Every structure is written in C-alpha cells, then in structure tokens.
Image (tube, rainbow, N blue to C red):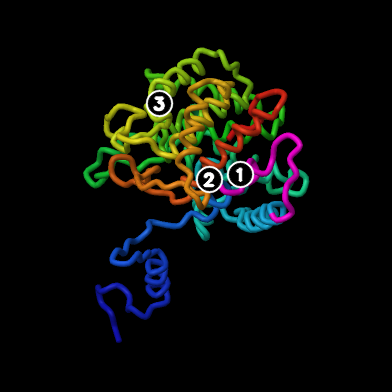
C-alpha cells in the first residue's frame, strides 16, 4: 500500500513507539485524566537522595543500614545514566568538550542539562567521592565547558541568547531560547565549589560576577525553572555561601532583607506563578511547604539559622506535616515556559521540607553552625 503525502502508516515502528510514549505519560485519577509533559527520574532521584542524605547525617549521626543501601542503589542507577559518548546540540558551541552530563528524563542523550548534572554530581560527591571519582570528573569537565561568555550557565546550551528570535511570528510563548539564568548558574557554582579544585576558581569568579549582575532591584533573583524569585534567591544564596562570599556582603544582606519581607503571617512563604507576568515577586494568597523550605534553606545558608524568621518558617513546616509524615501542596511550583506552561513536581513538597528540617536540626547540633554544602 502506498502513502502519498500522508506521512507514515499507523503500524510504522516509529509511530507505534511515539504513541506508546504518549500513553505512558497519561495519568488517570478517577474521573480525571491528564498527560504529563515528561517524567523526571534523574532530577527526582538526585533531589530525593540529597534530602535522604541530609536527614541521615549530622554530628554523631549513625546512618541506618537501609538508608546507606538505598543511597548506594540510587548512585549506582545514576552512574549508569551518565551520558559519556553522545554529543548533542550543545557541542556546536564547544566541540572539544567531552560529554559528561545527565538528562532530566530516562532517555534523552542528545539533551543533557547542567542543572541535573550539578545536582547529581553533588550527591555523588557528598556520599562517595572516591567511588564516584570518574563520574564526578566527567561531570565537572562538562559543566566547566558549558559556561557562557557572560559567566552564567543556561540549562542546555551555551550563549543561546539571541533575544530577537523570541519576537518572530511563531514564537508565541516567547521562550525559544535557553539563555543563562541565575538559578542554573548558582547550581553550577555550588557544584564546582563543593569539588574545590583551585584551577576552577576563575570559572567560579566569572559565575559569581554574573550572579551579582543578575540580582533584582528588590534584592531577589529570578528562578527560571522553579517558582520563582524565592527559588532563585535560595539557589543563589547557597552558591554565595559555599563560594565563600561573606554573610554580610551587600548582595547577601539585600537578599535576606527581601526574603524576610515576604514571609507570611503564618510563618511560611508562597509565590504565585503570576510573578512571571509582572506580579509582585514572592507573594501568593497562601503559604506553601515547598517555597517555605526554599526560603528557610536560603536563609540558613547565610547564617540566619537562629533568627525568629527562620524558626517561624520551621514551625510552619512542622505544623503542616500530616500523620503519614508528608506535606500537601496543590499549586504549581515550577515552570516549563514562563507565562505559558507551568508544572507541579509532586516530589517537591516532600524533598525540600525534609531537607530544610534536617538541615535546621543538623546546624543546631553543629559546633560551626555553618552550611558546608551549596544546595
């Protein structure tokens, strides 16, 4: 049977594979069915691993055997998914850089991103730097090679910032590009600082200069991949801390003042996705566990663990935990394309409150009281 101008038949293996992929993304909840844009196993595994590690650590902590085994299984799984032999579109601007990143999804070797790579790299480095040495080295090499000329990092590409493309007729969502952003750049700075290679310091300094330039007049930072300015500000404060920027640095003080100013009466924080469309940064009609955790983590990163603001945030998180040890949150907490397409990461409401409460406990038990991590 011939097909002229009609594409390919329904039984073509490529069509069947694409259709199966769509079916796998469908979620049915009773009378509601929706299609996820994608799944996020690498990202979720990295974040849940970091939260588990924080919860099972601290001064004089004895890590349960079950936790050690589960974290080891997660790291084994992640190492197998590191992209070491495929050069994607990112290589057009840095052809001599070897692959070494991780993708957000199960199978997307041509489009790894530095955000996932930094998060996975930090987990591998904190838990077993010797056993993960080669994976960490390749991740470091790739992230250093992916720095844009302005000192920042985009998620997937280098110098992908030709803004004119967002104004052509079919660019209706205004997000055709992948320019450097504060949240992604902060994660890369944090990862490189945690590794501590002296030869990376010029790369880190260029990243810090970029972050200083990107601070908003209010004192916050934009969050491209999480909602929104609370996410960006937490990310950058963690990076500034691990990079050795003093906690009384003017940029830090302005960010702290902003976070404290948008705390809600119940002790929590919340932010509306409308902040991507000009609404006031850091405001919403309710507090949310995810954004409260980000704010608390950001403030603790720069030495505010003992402040009433942080303690009220921690009290909010404790009060919101249910009998099963979980937190509930319905609003969107992340973004695919600002102004157009928002996301709800179901794991965020568990990962981040657990991390925040665990770090609050650990800092209270620590003699130094200083956060030694960049995330």
Whichever of labels 1 and 2 marks the residue nearer the N terminus, that label is 1
Q: Which residue is mark 3?
A: 263
Q: Which residue is mark 2?
A: 351
**Residue at the spot x=66%, y=24% of the render?**
369
The nearer-to-camera label among 1 and 2 is 2
Q: Position of residue 320 (x, y in %)?
A: 45, 41
Q: How many marks?
A: 3
Q: Position of residue 48 (x, y in %)?
A: 57, 48
Q: Where does the magenta region start and end?
A: 48-66
Q: Residue furthest left?
A: 169
Asked if residue 58 lies in the magenta stretch, the reply is yes
In the rendered image of this protein, does residue 180 appear above or below residue 119?
Answer: above
Q: Which residue is mark 1?
A: 50
Residue 208 located left or right of residue 266: right
Residue sitting nearer the eye, 309 or 73: 309
Q: Position of residue 114 (x, y in %)?
A: 54, 42
Mark 3 neighbour class, 10 Å CA radius: few under 14, some 14 to 19, many 20 or more:
many
Badge 1 element: helix
Viewport quadrant of the N terminus: bottom left
Asked if residue 328 lies in the magenta stretch, the reply is no
> What is the C-alpha distance between the residues marked 1 and 2?
8 Å
Residue 365 located left or right of residue 294: right
> What is the C-alpha distance between the residues marked 2 and 3?
21 Å
* CB contact under 8 Å: marks 3 and 1: no
Badge 3 element: loop
> What is the C-alpha distance between the residues marked 3 and 1?
26 Å
């Amino acid at each position: 049977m011939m097909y002229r101008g009609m594409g390919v038949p329904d039984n073509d293996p490529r069509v069947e594979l694409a259709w199966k992929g769509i079916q796998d993304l469908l979620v049915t909840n009773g009378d509601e069915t929706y299609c996820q844009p994608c799944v996020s196993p690498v990202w979720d595994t990295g974040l849940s691993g970091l939260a588990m590690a924080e919860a099972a650590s601290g001064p004089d902590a004895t890590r349960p055997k079950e936790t050690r085994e589960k974290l080891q299984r997660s790291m084994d799984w992640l190492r197998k998914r590191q992209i070491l032999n495929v050069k994607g579109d990112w290589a057009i601007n840095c052809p001599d850089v070897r692959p070494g990143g991780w993708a957000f999804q199960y199978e997307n070797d041509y489009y790894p991103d530095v955000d996932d790579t930094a998060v996975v790299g930090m987990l591998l480095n904190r838990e077993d730097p010797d056993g993960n040495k080669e994976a960490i080295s390749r991740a470091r090499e790739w992230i250093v090679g992916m720095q844009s000329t302005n000192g920042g990092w985009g998620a997937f590409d280098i110098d992908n910032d030709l803004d004119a493309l967002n104004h052509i007729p079919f660019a209706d969502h205004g997000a055709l590009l992948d320019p450097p952003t504060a949240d992604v750049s902060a994660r890369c700075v944090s990862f490189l600082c945690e590794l501590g290679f002296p030869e990376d310091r010029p790369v880190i300094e260029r990243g810090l200069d970029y972050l200083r330039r990107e601070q908003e007049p209010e004192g916050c930072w934009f969050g491209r991949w999480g909602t929104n300015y609370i996410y960006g500000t937490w990310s950058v404060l963690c990076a500034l801390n691990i990079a050795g920027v003093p906690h009384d640095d003017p940029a830090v003080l302005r960010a702290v003042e902003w976070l404290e100013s948008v705390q809600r009466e119940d002790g929590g924080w919340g932010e509306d996705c409308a902040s991507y469309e000009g609404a006031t940064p850091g405001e919403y009609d309710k507090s949310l566990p995810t954004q409260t955790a980000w704010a608390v983590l950001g403030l603790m990163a720069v030495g505010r663990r003992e402040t009433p603001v942080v303690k009220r945030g921690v009290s909010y998180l404790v009060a919101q935990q249910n009998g099963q040890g979980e937190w509930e949150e319905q609003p969107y907490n992340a973004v695919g394309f600002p102004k157009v397409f928002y996301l709800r990461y179901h794991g965020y409401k568990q990962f981040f409150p657990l991390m925040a409460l665990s770090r609050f406990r650990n800092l209270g038990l620590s003699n130094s009281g200083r956060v030694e991590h960049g995330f």
